[in-house]
Structure formats: structure tokens, C-alpha cells
Image (cartoon, rainbow, N blue to C red):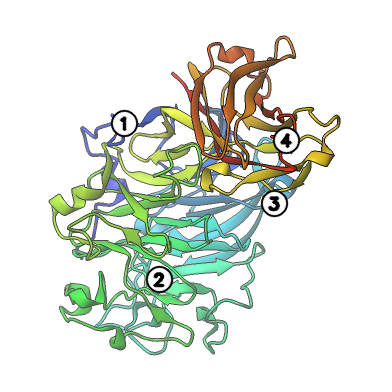
Amino acid sequence: MRHCCRSLLALLFLPGIASAQTLTDSRLKLANWVTGLSAPTSFTWIGPGEMFVIQKNDGKVRWVKDGVILGTALDLAVNSNSERGGLGIAADPDFANNGYVYVYYSISSTSADTTASGSWLDNRVERYTWNGSTLSSVFGPLIAFPSDSAQSNGPNHDGGIIRFGPDGMLYGQTGDLNRGRIGSTGRIEQNTAASGSATVGGIFRLATDGTIPSDNPFIGESDTSLHLWWSYGLRNGYGMTFDRVNGALWDTENGPNLYDEVCRVPKGMNSGWLRIMGPDSRDATYSENNNTAWDESDLVALANSDYLDPEFSFKTPVGITAISFLGSSLFPDDLVDNCIFGDNNNSNLYYCALKPSRNEFKLPSGLTDKVADNTGERNKILWGSSWSVVTDAQIGADGYLYVVSHLGNKIVRVRPVVDEVDPIEWLAETGSIISGTPGNVAASDDRYYAFADGALRPRFSPFRVRARFELNSAAPTALVVEAETHLLASGMPQAIELKNVNTGAWDVLDWDAIGTFDVAKSLPIATPADYIDPVTFEVDLRVTILPLPPPAFPRKIKLHFDLLRLLATYP
């Protein structure tokens, strides 16, 4: 059978794999964060700058902190034949209290790592407990997809990515292990029979103890094998993520010789495999669907299921892999919360902005049909090259993007050349505020603090709003305050001041009269180290307004913040 991409195992032995990653956006820079891994596939954060990384071929879970490998937390006996092996890892949402970590791997029937096709028992998810040095106290398997003598057993189409959703449930991909083909015993999950479960070929959803949630979409089916599914009709996938804005699940799905997909995956979705790949209207034909143009009406429709076309497809498969959202305010505003995904066949990264509805991509001219039909169209969304197969990408606690280079045996950090840092805390002078909550001022022109003259003691004393910022490092090469403010009264003096960490004094950075029109300022700080706490990396800023004498002084003042942030540049 022809596959969408070369297996990850085979690629490990190809010579001349490029390792110098590039990005098309000059506002971003990248650097190796941790090297010396061995065929890493996925990682999970367990604290700021601290993660576990699972490796495909040896089943080891490496403990990494601040870019240094501290040791091996767990060593699993894996069968790594073709696409099997150490595949996925996820820390419990309550990891800080329970220490739980979940791993998805292909277990060897021997006590050692093997590539022998006959030495595979199942693909499974187990739970371990972190004791500060090792992962131990195995619980489970929570779920297993075992060898079945009545069906195909791969070794391809294993999936393996696991993620916790915003609902606290564990989601994971399993490919179809080549089961449910037309001409053999058809199966529900492959849309080839109205009854009979393949037990693989979808996204599963479990509680943290392995039980099946009562609100899973197919919990009412008489065949209990279907109860675990969030979605079905999945050939295989190496990518899955949640949109932090609305909680929606997205995944990437691998096609045969036609159509790789990026899909939004609502509850109960039937993704169409094996009868449909790519948009239904394209009527794709290939050997697995008997070279027949099937329609949505030909799918096996379980109660509560709904077919949905992919949001983007590559007509010629690229071996699509990891998917992630740039869910960090540190990135340039036009990139924040937009989508990236990687591939296997070209070692590329791709970028797509989302429409305001966040249900589909805002695609460039030539791609509005949601399909890249050729290399030229594919390159319209090219974001980076020479990434040596991206198998995971996630935002860290520092707001930067961390990307697994599977064949590069490393994790690369992507960060802006200039950090755009929003306030983490706001404070107004006690007793003077009467309404308003600034929040994230970068997102709105209607964030304000309102003050009443009767709240000021004495009458002409200044009133102030303070903002606290937290940088990722105490040593930027440049630090700039960006401010845009206005009042409902004209000509009132405004000072922008910074707390000097050496003297404890408030140093005036800027002094000006502001009024009813927005005042935009870009204020470089000559000596950044004077204002950055060397321990917490915090900067304390305040905006001071001096009320004018009567009758110019209004009875009520509303200080609007249209923008207030720091721009920090690092080497």
C-alpha cells in the first residue's frame, strides 16, 4: 500500500538531512534549546523551563530543565517497527499536586526494545507518578489498542499524540492500523460497514482514570467499543491541539496518495476516511476507496455524528505532522493565536491566520478553495524550512514556541526579536478609583480608570495608575515603553515614571500635557538595568496625572489606556 509519507523510522537512516532551520518571518529568531536527544517525538511541560520528552525508538522519557538533559525519568520497552514506538506524553492538569504523567507507546512483548514485527502487543496509554527523580507507580493501561488476529495490525497508522483539553479530559489520536478496508471485513470507524468496530481510527476521549466520560458523543451506541470516540474516520495523524481562544480541537490527518488535511474537530465529527479524503466536492479516488468518488451520504453516520470538510488540504500529501497555535502575546500582534503546522516529506513549517470566527483560515489568493493543488500554492503558506520533521510544537511558560526537530534530535526555541510585554498587574491609588478595569490594553481602546475629584486628598494631589511588567530575562539589549493614553479633559500634565531598583526612587521617563486625543509615545530607556529587578525580572511603571486648578479641573477624570507595554530586545 502506498503511504502519504515515508515512515519516521526510515527517515532516521537517510543521509544529508539538513539541520539549519529557517523562518520566513524576519521578526522572529530561533536557537537550539536542547540537543542530544534521540528521535524525540513529543514533550510535555511540568514547570517553567522544565519538561519531559519521549523518544520514539528507545522509549526513553528524558527529563530536561532550562535546556539541559538532567536524566532519564522512564525507560519503556518499545516496539519501534515503522511508525510504532514512544509516541506521546502529557502531564496531568493537576500535575503540581498529583505528579501524574501519561505516556502513549507501542509496548514490546519482550523486556527490551525491538523492531521485530512479531514482538508487538499493543499501543497503550499508561499513567505514571513523578517522584522528583523518576516516573514510577504505573497505573493502567488506561486504554490499549491490541493486536487482533482478525484484523490488520499495522505497523503503520499508529497515531500517538495525546493532549489534555480545557475540559480536563485526555484526548488522543490512534490511526486505523490499516484496518477496515473495502474487500475485507468492513468497519464502522473506516466508514466501510454499518456494524462492527475496528477499535481504532479516531480521536478518543477519556477521564484521567481511564473511564469513559458520560458525555462522549457515542456513549449511547449499543456497541460499547464506540463509546471512547470523540471523532472517527481518521486514517492517521501526528498532530492535535486546542485553540486557547475558544477551546476548539484541531488536528492534522494523513491521506494516502491524495490529500493531507488540517481539520477542526467538533464533538462527534466523522472525518470521512476511508471513503473521503480532502473536500467532499473534490471526489478523490484512490486504491483504498476502490477508486470510487464517494459522497457524504455514503458514510456510516452514527447518531450524533456529523461530517465536516477539512479546513485546509494538500492535494499532494506532505506527510503533515504537528499543529499548534501561537498562543502568546509576546509574538507580533498579527501572529498571535494563529496556526502553524509541520510536515514530514519536506521538513517544512506552514502558517495560516484564522478568520475572526476562528472556524476557518484566512487564506491568501489562490488558496481560497482551501486546497494547495501544487508546490506554488503550497509555498503561499510556507513559514520555515529545513526543520528535519517537526513532531511537536507548544508554547512555554515564557511565551516562546518550542519545536521538536525529530531528525535533528533536538528542540528549537522560536522567539520574537523584540518581546511585546503586556502588564501582568494594575494598581490604582487607593480611594481614588471609581470604575474601570484596564485588563489587556493592547486588545481594546476602551480600557480606563475613572477618578472623582472628591476622592483626591488634598484636592490638587496627583492621582496615579501603576503597571507591573515581567520580562523573560534581566538583560535585554534595549527596552522601550510604548504608551498611548488620553483623557476626557484637555491639557492635564501626565508623567510616565519608572521605579529605579537601585535608588528606590521614581524616575520620570516622560512628561507631557495630554488631552482628549490619543497620545502615542515610544520611549527608549537609556539604562534598562536600573529598572529591572535582577531576581524577578519585573519592571514597575506608573502613570501620574496632575489635576489642573479650578475651573479647568473636571469633577470626573477618565484616564484611557489605548496601549501600554514594554518592548524588550534580546541578543
* Mark 2 vs mark 3, CA separation in Å: 29 Å
The residue identified by callout 2 is 201
The residue identified by callout 4 is 551
Please tell me whether residue 14 is drawn above or below residue 376 in the rendered image. above
User: Which secondary structure, mark 1?
Assistant: loop
Determine whether, in the image, residue 382 is placed left or right of residue 462. left
* Mark 4 vs mark 2, CA separation in Å: 75 Å
Of pointers 3 and 4, the one earlier in the residue sequence: 3
* Amino acid type assigned to the residue bearing label 1 in the image: Ser
Coordinates of residue 326 in the picture (x, y in percent): 44, 46
Does the rendering let one see residue 32? Answer: yes
Figure quadrant of residue 508: top right
**Mark 4, mark 1: which one is toward the viewer?**
4
Figure quadrant of residue 237: bottom left
The quarter of the image holding the C terminus is top left
Of pointers 4 and 1, the one earlier in the residue sequence: 1
* Amino acid type assigned to the residue bearing label 3 in the image: Asp
Figure quadrant of residue 406: top left
User: Which secondary structure, mark 2?
Assistant: loop
**Mark 3, mark 4: which one is toward the viewer?**
4
Of pointers 2 and 1, the one earlier in the residue sequence: 1
The residue identified by callout 1 is 26
* Mark 1 vs mark 3, CA separation in Å: 38 Å
User: Looking at this rendering, what residue extends furthest in the front direction?
Assistant: 551
The residue identified by callout 3 is 94
Of pointers 2 and 3, the one earlier in the residue sequence: 3
